Image (cartoon, rainbow, N blue to C red):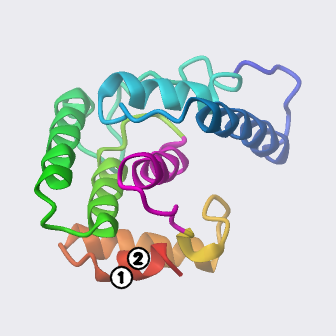
Amino acid sequence: MIPEHITRRQELDEWEQRNIIDAISWLQKARPTDILNETFIRKLHQRMFGKVWRWAGTFRTTDKNIGGPWYQIGPRLKNLCEDSKVWIASGTESPDEIAVRFHHRLVHIHPFPNGNGRHARLLTDLLLENILARPRFTWGSANLTSPGEARKRYIATLQAADNHDYQPLLAFVRS
């Protein structure tokens, strides 16, 4: 961790949130559209957590209980980005459906040691706003970082998507 003065979880959460707010400010100015690539995905994570974690923007190098093997992160991200470009170009699915499928796969890949959910939600919102010309998701209108009922519902919708049932996640993201 970069800030040495942090000693409690609440302080870490606040420090991360300030860093994320800085990243959002940068995104609002830059309005990037070339986001479906590994370089941008890493850059966004680094912007979101770079003042907190030395490893921000660096893929995990160990296996976790979520996501595939760490050595498959790069190829899986590339496939996700290429698939997303095809979904967008074909126009056969709604923008919300594209964004939900993108979000689910990115969360499932779990590229970083920490911050994957927050990163995936922000990147999905960028996809919606800057490429698909749609409003951001509301993500259940709740804090999904802290444990609670909203987070439980969110995780349940992701688990349904694991079984190819995207309807609960589609409903949740606009609730």
* Residue 93 located within the stretch drawn in magenta: no
| Residue drawn at x 27%, y 53% as measured from the top left | 105
Which residue type does callout 1 highlight? Pro
Q: Position of residue 163 (x, y in %)?
A: 19, 73
Which element carries disc 1, helix, strand or loop?
helix
Q: Is residue 151 above or below residue 112?
A: below
What secondary structure is the magenta-colored segment mainly?
helix
- Position in image of residue 67 (x %, y %): 29, 47
Say which mark, if any, is on residue 45.
none
Identify residue type, mark 2.
Answer: Ala
Q: Residue furthest right?
A: 5
Q: Quadrant of residue 76?
A: top left
Q: Position of residue 62 (x, y in %)?
A: 35, 29
Circle 1 crowding by C-alpha within 10 Å: few under 14, some 14–19, many from 20: some
User: Dot 2: what SS?
Assistant: helix
**Range drawn in magenta:** 115-137
Q: Work out whether residue 38 or residue 25 is closer to the camera in this orientation and state it.
A: 25
User: Residue at the spot x=53%, y=36% of the render?
Assistant: 31
**Residue placed most toward the observer, 66 or 88:** 88
Tell me which residue sits at (57%, 29%) in the image.
30
Nearest the viewer among 106 and 85 is: 85
Determine crowd level at label 2: few under 14, some 14-19, many 20+ residues with C-alpha closer than 10 A: some
Contact flag, marks 1 and 2 (Cβ < 8 Å):
yes
Figure check: 31 above or below 47: below
Q: Is residue 59 left or right of residue 138?
A: left
User: Residue 156 bears which disc, if any?
Assistant: 2
* CA distance separating discs 1 and 2: 8 Å
Percent from the top left, x then y, of residue 107?
37, 51
As drawn, the label of residue 168 is 1
In the rendered structure, which disc, 1 or 2, sits on the residue that comes first in sequence? 2
Identified at 44% across, 46% down, the residue is 130
